[in-house]
Image: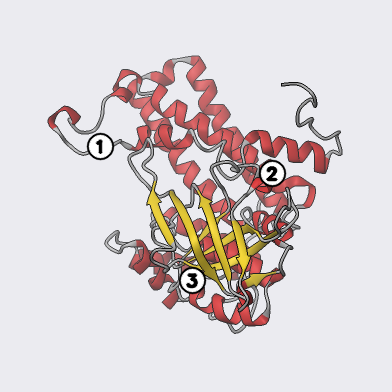
């Protein structure tokens, strides 16, 4: 199963490949790279709307661009949250004024976004958020609370925040989706979280009376849960295919390491390598099967997350297994005071430990599939009267 790319698609592939070859050089920082993409019209390819500064591409051309971008070795996008999450949400739920204000700067690569969902006491359980947003007499919302694991908050100009606007509300009720400017010294504090990998692209974000304007509520006050769930459905799609191109490259490097170390002679290792290859093909076929359909139909997004999260984690385990004892040695002499650094295989192993947690843990994905797709009885939340 695969796309039947037309001659026009292949011509577009050559155009995309040539542009990337001429511009990917590794010298630009991520915000500058976003502006470079925006100036050339490469942002917002899937929006399908006019007047916001983006090209309009058919689905197969979107796939072509995503694949070529992944193959080119271009840097990880810092604008993907605005392009792939916020923009489709505004197109589905926003007002015309909101689209006109926020989409052109995203398409130009001039405004970067982060996502204010998870909290210390409400990670995968998004309905448990406690961040509050209280409305002043002039219509301004004042936001107080903490968000965590906020990707790229240290680079973002704006944050879309899920907050509780109805006092005493619980679970899915009383939540509102707010667009909040990050440049509010004294009211918003961003603290990077250093991880096992030594990097800190995730952050804690503290809101202390941060302001959001009433006209920047998306979908209406109290309708935040529906908007938030709609946004999560946009996380999957064409980008999943690009992700798999990256996965294929990682698998190739693990295979070469297995050959170089002699680990490939072990039949158990060979079986695991073949299984990784076969499962990656299954993920591609599943992505192609669901592409272009409803983002939430049949739990497709949840199934996709389960597939790639576990697959990538197992690949990280293989990456160090095939290297044997050498995987425990750093690329630099740490005892000599060198900076903390991991090689590619070690980074893959460390970072992939989180794959089955972030974006909704495996347990949450299975619960959603069981209850909302298969119609099984809801999971018990505990036994009353015990404790």
Name the residue furthest left.
336
- For this rendering, which residue is in front, 108 or 253? 108
Report the residue at 42% width, 55% height from top: 76
Left or right, residue 241 beside residue 27: right
> Which mark is in front, 1 or 2?
1
Q: Is residue 270 above or below residue 97?
A: above
Q: Is residue 45 visible?
A: yes
- State the residue position of label 1: 340
Q: Which of marks 2 and 3 is in front?
A: 2
Q: Distance between the residues labelled 1 and 2?
A: 35 Å
> Alpha-carbon neighbours of circle 3 within 10 Å: few (<14), some, or many (≥20)?
many
Residue 358 in the image, given as x and y percentages of width and height: 55, 42
Q: Is 202 situated left or right of 369 in this image?
A: left
Give SS at disc 3.
loop
Query: Residues under labels 3 and 1: Cα distance?
Result: 35 Å
- The tag earlier along the polypeptide, 1 or 2, is 2
Q: Can you tell which mark lies on residue 42?
A: 3
Disc 2 from disc 3: Cα separation: 28 Å
- Give x and y (percent) for residue 126: 65, 47
- Which residue is pictured at 50% across the width and 72% down the height? 106
User: Which residue is drawn at the image coordinates 70% and 55% (left, top)?
Assistant: 229
Residue at the image position 66 percent from the left and 45 percent from the top: 128
Disc with the residue nearer the chain's start (3 vs 1): 3
Q: Which residue lies furthest to the bottom in this view?
A: 51
Establish if 266 lies above or below 260: above
On residue 302, which mark appears? 2
Q: In which quarter of the image is the C terminus?
A: top right
Query: Foreground: 266 or 243?
Result: 243
Give whichever of discs 2 and 3 has the lower sequence position. 3
Q: Count neighbours of disc 1 (C-alpha within 10 A) and say few if under 14, some if 14 to 19, many if 20 or more.
A: some
Query: Where's residue 365, x and y in %?
Result: 69, 39
């Amino acid at each position: 199963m695969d796309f039947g790319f037309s001659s026009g698609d292949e011509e577009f592939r050559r155009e995309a490949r040539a542009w990337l070859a001429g511009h990917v050089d590794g010298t630009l920082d991520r915000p500058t790279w976003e502006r470079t993409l925006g100036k050339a019209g490469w942002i917002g390819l899937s929006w399908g709307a006019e007047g916001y500064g983006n090209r309009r591409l058919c689905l197969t051309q979107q796939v072509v661009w995503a694949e070529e971008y992944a193959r080119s070795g271009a840097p990880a996008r810092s604008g993907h949250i605005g392009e792939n999450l916020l923009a489709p949400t505004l197109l589905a739920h926003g007002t015309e004024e909101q689209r006109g204000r926020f989409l052109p700067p995203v398409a130009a690569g001039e405004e970067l976004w982060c996502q204010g969902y998870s909290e210390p006491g409400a990670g995968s359980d998004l309905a448990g958020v406690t961040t509050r947003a209280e409305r002043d007499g002039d219509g301004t919302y004042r936001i107080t609370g903490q968000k965590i694991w906020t990707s790229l908050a240290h680079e973002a100009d704006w944050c879309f925040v899920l907050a509780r606007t109805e006092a005493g509300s619980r679970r899915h009720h009383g939540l509102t989706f707010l667009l909040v400017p990050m440049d509010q010294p004294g009211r918003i504090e961003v603290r990077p979280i250093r991880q096992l990998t030594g990097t800190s692209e995730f952050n804690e974000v503290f809101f202390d009376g941060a302001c959001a304007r009433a006209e920047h509520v998306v979908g209406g006050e109290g309708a935040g849960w529906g908007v938030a769930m709609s946004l999560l459905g946009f996380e999957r799609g064409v980008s999943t295919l690009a992700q798999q191109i990256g996965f294929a490259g990682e698998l190739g490097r693990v295979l070469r390491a297995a050959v170089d170390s002699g680990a490939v002679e072990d039949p158990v290792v060979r079986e695991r390598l073949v299984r990784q290859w076969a499962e990656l093909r299954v993920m591609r076929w599943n992505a192609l099967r669901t592409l272009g359909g409803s983002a939430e139909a049949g739990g497709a997004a949840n199934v996709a997350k389960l597939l790639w999260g576990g697959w990538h984690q197992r690949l990280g385990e293989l990456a160090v297994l095939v290297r044997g004892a050498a995987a425990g040695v750093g690329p630099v002499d740490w005892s000599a005071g060198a900076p903390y650094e991991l090689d590619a295989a070690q980074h893959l192993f460390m970072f992939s430990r989180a794959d089955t947690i972030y974006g909704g843990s495996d347990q949450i994905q299975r619960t959603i599939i069981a209850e909302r797709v298969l119609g099984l009885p809801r999971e018990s939340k505990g036994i009353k009267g015990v404790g």
